[in-house]
Image (tube, rainbow, N blue to C red):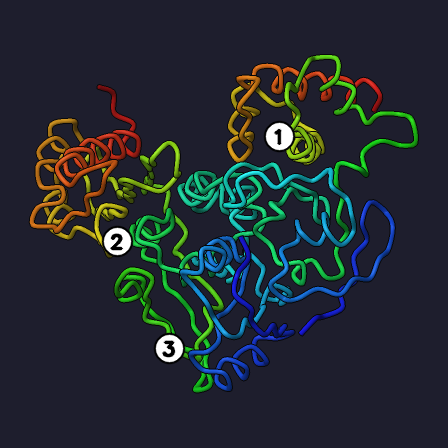
Amino acid sequence: MKQTINLKVNGEACQIDVEPRTLLVYAIREILNLTGTHVGCDTSSCGACTVLMNGKAVKSCTLFAVQADGCEITTVEGLAKQDELHPIQQSFKEKHGLQCGFCTPGMMMLACEILQASEEMSEENLRKLLKGNLCRCTGYQNIVDSIADAKARMTAVA
Amino acid sequence: MIPASFEYFRANSVDEAIEMMAKYGDEAKILAGGQSLIPMMKLRFARPAKLIDIGRIDSLRYITLDGDTVKIGGLTTHRDLETSNLIAEKIPVLAECAHEIADLQIRNVGTIGGSLAHADPSADYPPVMLALDATVVARGQNGTREISINDFFISPFTTALGQDELLIEVKIPAMKSNEKGAYIKIAHPATGFGVVNCAVKIALSNGKITNARVAFGSFVTVPYRDESIEKFLQEKEATVDTIKQASEMVAEGKDIIGDYYADADYRRNLAKAVFLRVMKKALNLDS
């Protein structure tokens, strides 16, 4: 039996009907048609499905949509403001943080939580925080560079 | 992957959750963060007919100090523990342990109560809880009871919790100034599952070990405290020589899990090496 849940997705309130077993990632992709969030491994390993739930990075393939009832969800589509890229997007673009692009939405959403932290972050710690996101193209170096660049960009503005 | 269909119930209080558990019996499973349960349901290793979601019971999410005891609500996330100033000050080894769990996204959602009740023998918490003399607080229809962590893990994925009992709190004695703790996990690099993990808590006085807690997990079906090693360490000098001798006793007489990636002999040897590393870390010894 379907249940009605309320979400605030990228700032917009929405009401959807889901089966209890519907995973959050499928609610986002197939009901809300926001296909920027990817399904990679579907086994909680790769992080391609990472979104922010109430500001925290979560794996949307490992949550039921009903668990997110009443929560604020931010997906990759919610990053840019009109034509202006979010600093993390600008940095991924400039520092070549992607090749095929499949892991990129998840990488950027994880980065969004990391970037909220006010303290300095060593490259080692940054790499450790990327543990839950897999990239088969870049070898990670450019992703680490991109996040560090975004951090510098955002600190300069703040 | 899509889990089998189930009926979903959200409990808004501990009492409501316990009522639902009593009503639905073994048809129902508790959903806390779901970071172990949901993957198992997706693989259809678990097919509960009903899920009771306790994730919104905010009163179960806390870390407080009561005298010399740290009290942790069952719904406290791994990330909460990893970043808590109180834990960093009173039980730093628990913060280290929480930091080792899975990845940031999982730690943001997964809970200490969920992990303990799931009782995966390769999980991070069990050896640490055993070394720290933790107590699990469970509430059911017949009231609240305390279960020593030594009696909590029964067999893989089975605990001493009753059918209608909810794990509501974990109580851990704050570490004293002469006590040192350490935890190390060796995980399979691809799956992330523990191959060997070991936690210790050592009390020292004038360079002598006055009390020791030594616990292991991952290579046995039920995480355990090794009381022979604890006894051996008692009143010994805290030296490399002492811990080398003790390491010979690691996993003695234990039935060790072996699999395609790490056979039993390998894990036995690794357990000795990990024990040495943990002890050196706790006692701040070189070489």
Left or right of residue B20: residue A36: right
Q: Nearer the viewer, mark 1 or mark 2?
A: 1
Q: Amino acid at mark 3?
A: Gly
Q: Position of residue B102 (x, y in %)?
A: 46, 41
Asked whether the residues under the numbered discs 2 and 3 touch, taking CB atoms below 8 Å apart as contact, a structural biologist would say no
Asked whether the residues under the numbered discs 1 and 2 touch, taking CB atoms below 8 Å apart as contact, a structural biologist would say no
The residue lying furthest to the right in this view is: A82
Residue nearer the viewer, A95 or B86 = A95
Left or right of residue B173: residue A5: right
> Quarter of the image holding residue B249?
top left
Q: Which residue is mark 3?
A: B162
Q: Which residue is mark 2?
A: B223
Q: Which chain's residue wears label 2?
A: B
Residue nearer the viewer, A76 or B133 = A76
Q: Which chain's residue wears label 1?
A: A
Left or right of residue A64: residue A72: right
Q: Residue at x 43, y 58 (%)?
A: B69
